[in-house]
Structures are given as structure tokens and as C-alpha cells.
Image (cartoon, rainbow, N blue to C red):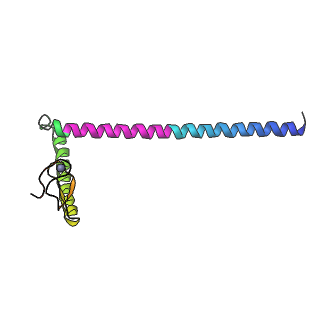
Amino acid sequence: MGILDDVVINAKSAAEAVGKKAGQIMDVSKLRINAAELNSEISKRYQALGQYVYESCREQLAGDGEVVGKMAEIDELAAQYAAVSKELGDKQNKVTCPGCGRQCSSSEAYCGTCGAKLGE
Ligand SMILES: [Zn+2]
């Protein structure tokens, strides 16, 4: 083999090594993305489960102090959210629909989404 052959072979094996390394990096990137997506999906399911329990199982869980405390925290945050939403709506001449929660113009008499009477 001549020097040129050695150079070609070395360049080829170097390229293969780089390709292999890049492949490993891609595998790690894909795995990270996959892990992040799964973790996000788990969080969504926890949230959905929590909302279901909050809305459907209040009475059954009334004896569990920790659950009751966490529900009270959500109630407090929901009250703060309603107050902030109302203040924001007032500043933007909007009213919150009592039926569906949509922000409607204060000039509208009825909600365009659910038809509930506004401004009461
Ligand atoms: Zn509505």
C-alpha cells in the first residue's frame, strides 16, 4: 500500500469514527427528547388526574387532611385568578361570561359562545 492509500484509509476510518460519534450524540439527543416528552405526558396525566379528583372526589376525600389542604390552596388560587381576571376585564372593557368564562365585550348583552346573559 502506498502513502496515498494509508491517507485514504485513515481519512475513511476518521470519518467513520466521527459518524459513529455523531450517531451516538443523535441517539442521546433522541433519548433526551423522548424522555422529556414522556415526562411531559406524565405531568399532563397527573394534572388531569388531580383535576378529576378535585372536581369529582371532594366528599370522599374530606377525611384526608393533606388532600383537603391542597384543594383549599387551589380554591384560594382560583379565587385570586377570578379577581385578577375581573380586574383585567374591567381595564379592557371586558366582562367574564358567567356561563363559560369567555371574555366578552362589555357592550355585548349576551355571550357569543354560550348565550348567557352578561353584565349581572
Ligand atoms: Zn359564555
Outermost residue on the bottom side: it is 91
Residue 53 in picture, x, y percent from top left: 20, 37
Quadrant including the C terminus = bottom left
Residue 4 in picture, x, y percent from top left: 87, 39
Would you say residue 34 sits in the magenta stretch? Answer: yes
Dividing the picture into quadrants, the one containing residue 119 is bottom left
Quadrant including the N terminus = top right
Residue 48 in picture, x, y percent from top left: 27, 38
Q: Is residue 41 above or below residue 106?
A: above
Question: Quick one: 70 or 38, which is closer to the camera?
Answer: 38
Residue at x 84%, y 37% (from the top left corner): 6
Residue at x 52%, y 38% (from the top left corner): 30
Residue at x 56%, y 36% (from the top left corner): 27
In the rendered structure, the answer to whether residue 104 lies left or right of residue 6 reads left
Outermost residue on the left side: it is 120
The chief SS type of the magenta part is helix
Q: Is residue 97 above or below residue 53?
A: below
Dividing the picture into quadrants, the one containing residue 68 is top left
Question: Quick one: 36 or 120, which is closer to the camera?
Answer: 120
Residue at x 16%, y 36% (from the top left corner): 56
Question: Quick one: 67 or 88, which is closer to the camera?
Answer: 88
Residue 71 in picture, x, y percent from top left: 18, 44
| Residue span colored magenta | 31-53
Would you say residue 75 sits in the magenta stretch? Answer: no
Dividing the picture into quadrants, the one containing residue 28 is top right
Q: How many marks?
A: 0
